[in-house]
Image (cartoon, rainbow, N blue to C red):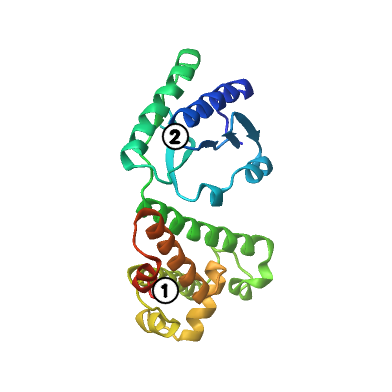
């Protein structure tokens, strides 16, 4: 767990301040920290199990996420329910919350808390994109170290350093093909996307692309495309007044 200067009683004080802010503004707000604290409804929930039980993004429906730092070190995220809330109110919320945090913490801890602008949809999309690769990379690493018989590399019975250049080049080629496929999907997410079309774009056979897509990203090709389309549709539904049938046509559903 990451070490931050605040103790349980400090988080209770902050939870009260966040609850007061929610009551005054009528903007439901929670604060999640990287040391696994969730401040919600004037209460503090600690540990991943309690956090997961008490945070419900479906209930928030549309939300703004503000990164929070202590002395330029990422501390956590303030999450505000932004249904029927103007962008101006969201911006003012950032300043108000930053002032609250600093009034409570700066005198005692001599630290500066910064609440940054809410992440926009493109930034959130990039974070999800990065997370996909991070999870895939982690999963691949776990396979290499804990389940060696399941990796192609183990037919050589070697470590990465000892692996023949041909095998390393093959792995690099697979990663580049997946990168190119994902880039094509992102650029064409508003159109109908087929496995054969993407395979042609990255110069692979459809069956091979499907196989490496599942292996690297742990998701079927068509499921990945549909997840991305649903994400784009959700953003449009949340941030615009466009009718559902128009949005569906826009993204190829």
Position above or below: 214 against 75: below
Identified at 55% across, 66% down, the residue is 162
Q: As drawn, is 188 to the left or to the right of 46?
A: left
Q: Position of residue 11 (x, y in %)?
A: 58, 25
Q: Which mark is residue 204?
A: none
Q: Are marks 1 and 2 in contact (CB under 8 Å)?
A: no
> Foreground mark, 1 or 2?
2
Q: Nearer the viewer, residue 24 or 71?
A: 24
Q: As drawn, is 81 to the left or to the right of 8?
A: left
Residue named by callout 1: 177
Secondary structure under tag 2 reads strand
Residue named by callout 2: 68
Count every numbered label the image shows and give the total. 2
Badge 2: how crowded within 10 Å, few (<14), some, or many (20+)?
many
Q: Position of residue 14 (x, y in %)?
A: 54, 25
Position above or below: 76 against 236: above
Identified at 66% across, 38% down, the residue is 47
């Amino acid at each position: 767990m990451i070490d931050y200067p605040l103790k349980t009683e400090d988080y209770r004080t902050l939870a009260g301040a966040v609850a007061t802010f929610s009551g005054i503004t009528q903007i439901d707000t929670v604060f999640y920290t990287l040391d696994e604290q969730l401040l919600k409804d004037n209460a503090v929930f600690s540990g991943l199990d309690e956090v997961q039980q008490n945070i419900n993004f479906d209930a928030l429906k549309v939300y703004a996420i503000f990164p929070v730092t202590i002395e330029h070190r990422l501390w956590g995220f303030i999450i505000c329910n932004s249904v029927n809330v103007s962008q101006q109110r969201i911006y003012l919320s950032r300043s108000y919350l930053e002032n609250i945090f600093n009034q409570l913490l700066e005198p005692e801890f001599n630290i500066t808390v910064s609440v940054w602008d809410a992440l926009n949809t493109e930034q959130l999309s990039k974070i999800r994109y990065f997370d996909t690769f991070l999870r895939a990379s982690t999963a691949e690493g776990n396979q290499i170290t804990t389940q060696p018989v399941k990796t192609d590399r183990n037919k050589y019975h070697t470590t990465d350093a000892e692996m023949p250049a041909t095998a390393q080049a093959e792995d690099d080629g697979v990663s580049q093909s997946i990168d190119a496929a994902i880039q094509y999907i992102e650029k064409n997410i508003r159109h109908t996307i087929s496995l054969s079309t993407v395979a042609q774009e990255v110069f692979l056979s459809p069956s091979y692309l499907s196989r490496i897509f599942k292996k690297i990203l742990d998701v079927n090709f068509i499921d990945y495309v549909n997840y991305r389309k649903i994400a784009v549709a959700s953003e449009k539904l949340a941030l615009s007044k466009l009718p559902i049938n128009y949005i569906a046509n826009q993204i190829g559903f």
